[in-house]
Amino acid sequence: MEFSDIRSQAKRAGHAPGVLIYTGRSKNPTQITLVNYTKESCAEKSTLNFDEISTFLDEPGNHWIQAEGFKDVDIISQIQKKFQLHPLTAEDILTGQRAKLEEFDHYIFVTLKILTWDKAKKKFAIDQVGLVLGSHFLLSFSSGPLDIFKKIKDKLMSGPKQRLREQSTDYLFYRLIDAIIDQYFVVLEELGELIDSTETLIVTEPERHHIRKLYRMKRETLMLRKSIWPMREVVNHLSQLDDKFITKFTRLYIRDVYDHTMQAIDTIETYRDMLSSMVDIYLSSLTNRLNEVMKTLTIISTIFIPITFIASFYGMNFYNMTELKWRYGYPTVIVIMILSVIAMMIYFRKKKWF
């Protein structure tokens, strides 16, 4: 559970179970979109008033209702009464929940975590999507418009003779879940590139701000794991439902979604191992960098030892030091110092110390 989910649960303290209270941060007005489709036709209607589309629900065909935005809780309450949803289902739609599946007499309810990547900030955001699947109807709830759902709706309305039109709402239900999980891989790919670039910087130029960035990515990876890991149970449960909600045709595709979910989980575990090893790489890089600095300082100090000895030796002010009165004493000492430096450099080179 993310921190925002904890805050939302804390805001509900003291309220009775099933009371509809939106505790999120989004202030988007509740936009209702009805897509009524059959094999031959497809119609869409968008409104801010649920009563305007409630009359269309009696028409034959499959109904997909999108509720985007939770500002108007009364609209969510109207949808709950119209489709006879359990009060706890409506409560879970408005509050932060881990991914889960609940089965009722005439519908199943699924909450999922959807991920979006912000290229400017180079970080991801986590939001919740609620899906209610019943006989010839599908309800989707989100705190705002979702591009991935828009693509599916455009595909649905593009024309007849396509699988979305030919199958019931359970296949559309699968397509929405598949789109959400496919979005995970977009975020994982961006996060993987960020991890690779950070690893290169840590190896070549280990700086203090790199380790802060590293720990931030470890925390984000942990949040990813907590968001995606429960999806395994949800998709596995879906693949085992009877024909009352999920047909045999759709269950085959849901098994494929399960494979994708496991692949995403394996990728997250790989990233966690990489980030853990990068901490050791950072410490090793710092140690190697310190060793290089100490090595350079040691070589410089060693080179100046004979020069310092010669300078201090002839710095003694004894009267009987004949070299002090010699005409060529000073140039000779300078030459000796230069030759000693050259000899030390040649010796270090042969030892491959630099």
Image: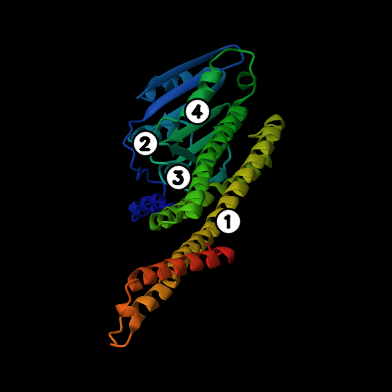
Drawn side of residue 270 relative to residue 218, left or right: right
Q: Residues within 10 Å of mark 4 (few under 14, many from 20)?
A: some
Q: Which residue is drawn at 36% across and 36% down?
A: 70
Residue at image mark 1: 273
Q: Are marks 1 and 4 in contact (CB under 8 Å)?
A: no
Residue at image mark 2: 70
Front tag of 1 and 4: 1
Q: Any mark on residue 134, and which?
A: none
Residue at image mark 3: 92
Q: Which residue is drawn at 49% across and 21% down?
A: 35
* C-alpha distance separating marks 1 and 4: 33 Å
Residue type at mark 4 is Phe
Q: Which residue is drawn at 46% across and 18% down?
A: 56
Q: Quadrant of residue 261?
A: top right
* C-alpha distance separating marks 1 and 2: 38 Å
Task: Return the residue nearer the eye: 153 or 281.
Answer: 281
Residue 1 visible in the snapshot = no
Task: Return the residue nearer the eye: 28 or 114.
Answer: 114
Q: Do the residues labelled 4 and 2 touch (CB within 8 Å)?
A: no
Residue 203 at x, y = what percent? 51, 54
Residue at image mark 4: 149
* C-alpha distance separating marks 4 and 3: 21 Å
Q: How crowded is mark 3: few (under 14 residues within 10 Å), some or many (20 or more)?
A: some
